[in-house]
Amino acid sequence: MVLILGRRLNREDSGVRESPAVKRKVLEMDSKPVSNHDVFDFSSGPCHSDSILQMFNEFRDGRLFTDVVISVEGREFPCHRAVLSACSSYFRAMFCNDHRESREMLVEINGIRAEAMDTFLQYVYTGRARITTDNVQFLFETSSLFQISTLRDACAKFLEDQLDPCNCLGIQRFADAHSLKQLASRCRSYALQSFADVAQHEEFLDLRKEELEEYIASDEMVIGKEETVFEAVMRWVYYDVDHRRIMLKDLLNHVRLPLLHPNYFVQTVEGDQLIQNAPECYQLLHEARRYHVLGNEMMSPRTRPRRSTGFSEVIVVVGGCERMGGFNLPYTECYDPVTGEWKSLAKLPEFTKSEYAVCALRNDILVSGGRINSRDVWMYNSQLNIFYILLPKCIKTD
């Protein structure tokens, strides 16, 4: 049966008898432009490629049309060169160039696990892979070797979702080894946020000295008190005390010893036998003692609180005047150099008409003057954010 599309000719009108030997046109093209009604663009969508992949996977299971066998750890995986080459540039370079593997039926690949290769091929032929805590590391290494970035990124995302105080340090080391900067940064942030819990697990004791220093030196560490850092350092040192005792001074250099509670410092720090037998640490102990006596009059990198404690070093500006210098102003503000923010503090209790003197006493501020012949002394309490008079007015009596 022949389907004839087009305009039918009338033999009588043409005056010519059609010869049996003359072929009839199946489709007669008109000179008019083609309209949308004359064309139908059909697409079956993703189901077409999915069905083909599914069929290729069935061929692989039945060893139909397979033209190469991948051997991993003695286990053989029949495959199709075309499918592997279409999915992986690693196999495309292997099979499409004049390599020995492009001519051999059996290709052996070393350095990967057979289970990971099985999961990898499932992804190649179906677009799906089952990632678990048991296979994620080997599957990541396999997808990296075969340059499958989508599967590699899925493994990295899975590791990020599995972060826990007991594994974040190990995952960070894995991320650093494979140049996964985003995952490594996420692990480091997680460890800093959960340092107290992380320090209780075995992975913490396996840290290298440089890795431990990087953590305990950070202002981003979230802890309730500095004693947590000191105890973590001592636990790490005592774990292998024969080899790590010489590192004690370098590690304590990053612990904010002056911020330890005085009673804890005397009883626990100075009472530790290892510290007592480490003369190189005496200078750090002396610094902490001086701070407990002098307060903010003695400054060092170890007297700066970590951000998680809620304290920070600020610059306090007391008073001031109008731009034209006409009026003195009672404002008190502080500037945080880390955040770059200004914050208003409690105003001076009395309107100032003249200069005054200001000094700091630990975390509080003393203000005197403000009026001619004034003998008032006010103290600003940083914890309560208030000014209160320290010395009452002196009344002259005859």
Image (cartoon, rainbow, N blue to C red):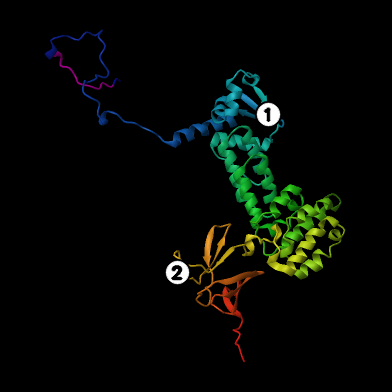
- Percent position of residue 275, x then y: 84, 59
- Percent position of residue 272, x then y: 84, 63
Label 2: how many residues lie within 10 Å, few (<14), some (14-19) or many (20+)?
Answer: few
Picture residue at 61% right of the left edge, 49% below the top? 186
Q: Secondary structure at mark 2?
A: loop
Q: Which residue is mark 1?
A: 109
- Tell me which segment is drawn in magenta: 3-11
With respect to residue 102, does 375 lie above or below? below
Q: Is residue 110 magenta?
A: no
What residue type is disc 2 on?
Gly
Does residue 135 show up?
no
What residue type is disc 1 on?
Ile
Residue 326: mark in rendering: 2
- Percent position of residue 350, x then y: 52, 77
Does residue 249 show up?
yes
Quadrant position of residue 111: top right
Characterize the magenta stretch by its predominant secondary structure.
Answer: loop
Picture residue at 55% right of the left edge, 38% below the top? 150
